[in-house]
Amino acid sequence: MKIYRRAAITVALFALLSCTDEPHQGSTAVSEISAKVDALDEKIKSAIVGYDWKLTLDHHRMAQKENSYTPPSIATIFSDPDVNSRILQNNSQLIALDLPFKFLAYAEPGGNDAILAYTSAEFIASRHDLPASLLVEYSERLDSVLNLVENSTISEVETEQIGKDFAIVKIKSDFDFETTIERLKETINSLPDTIWFGELDYQNDAKKIGIELNPTRLLLFGAPEPGAKAMNSTPKLGLDAFCQKLLVFEDEGGSVWAAYNDITAFSNLYYDKATLPQRLIKRRLKSTISNTLEQN
């Protein structure tokens, strides 16, 4: 029954999003700014060749394959298990929602410049109430990338608005950790418009360097066509909301939780607005995850 319910939500989403495309630049202008975004992304990639775990998400070109449009936007994600594990050791597992490292090379609608956004140490410290001393290594890894680009290229996030647990949605699971993971994967892979990108097992990575963590795993997936419409006028959302980062963890009391970023909260943070496609995706995501994690 829940599979049919999810399918119905997906069909409804397609129908409601079908008329939400906004006008965009001509093909020549898009090609020119795409080249600039590509060049900026290549600088990021040149700095992370030594990392074992890497993932690139080209939102603009994935949207094109679905006959949709979002401004040029490429997310590059990479992981340093040592840094992740030391940050998470004896601290809230929710921090893992903002790990590993993520950079976004993108252009604003109608813009002619390539911009770089990233998840800063200051943002993580504010969102999770952490001392700056815990994020020194994280900052050093960031700087090794940021030093390759002009300061004028970088889009900062003002942290004054960021309080503890800002824009984090948590849903409790009725199942144990492994069953929760299995059910979520089954649901995600059953959605016709959704792509599975990968996962990161923080507990396993920590174990390799002698650090004990409770089960903590990050699932990465996305729906290129609905995502394109949600990013059409707000492409910086590619940093925090697309692809979707779904953190699953078991807390000290043995309860299992799924946590993810509130799309509309980040859109309001970056653009002072939330659009209809974002609100629809937010509703769909919460319904899908809640239904998956409830006992029949």
Image: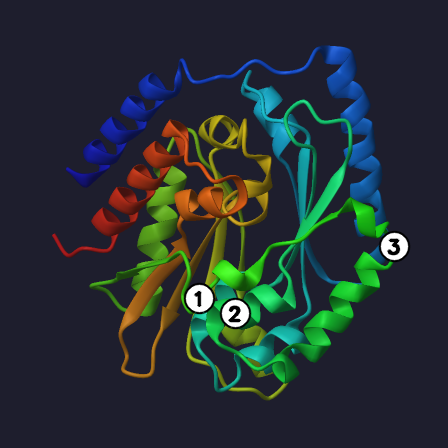
Quadrant of residue 172 in the image?
bottom left
Residue under pointer 3: 148
Q: Mark 3 packing: few (<14 Cα in 10 Å), some, or many (20+)?
A: few
Q: Given contact means CB atoms under 8 Å apart, are the residues at marks 2 and 1 in contact?
A: yes
Lower sequence index among marks 2 and 3: 2
Please say whether residue 48 is visible from this viewpoint.
Answer: no
Q: Is residue 23 above or below residue 52?
A: above
Q: Amino acid at mark 2?
A: Ser
Task: Give the mark, 2 or 1, whose residue is nearer the N terminus.
Answer: 2
The amino acid type, in three-letter code, at marker 3 is Leu
- Which quarter of the figure has residue 273? top left
Between residues 247 and 36, which one lies in front from this camera angle?
Answer: 36
- The amino acid marked with disc number 1 is Gly
How much space separates mark 2 and mark 1, taking CA atoms?
6 Å
Residue of label 2:
126
Locate the N terminus and report the quarter of the image it occupies.
Answer: top left
Q: Residues within 10 Å of mark 2 (few under 14, many from 20)?
A: some
Residue that numbered label 1 is attached to:
163
The secondary element bearing badge 2 is classed as: helix
Residue at left offset 26%, top offset 74%? 255
Q: Would residue 54 be found to the left or right of residue 211 on screen?
A: right
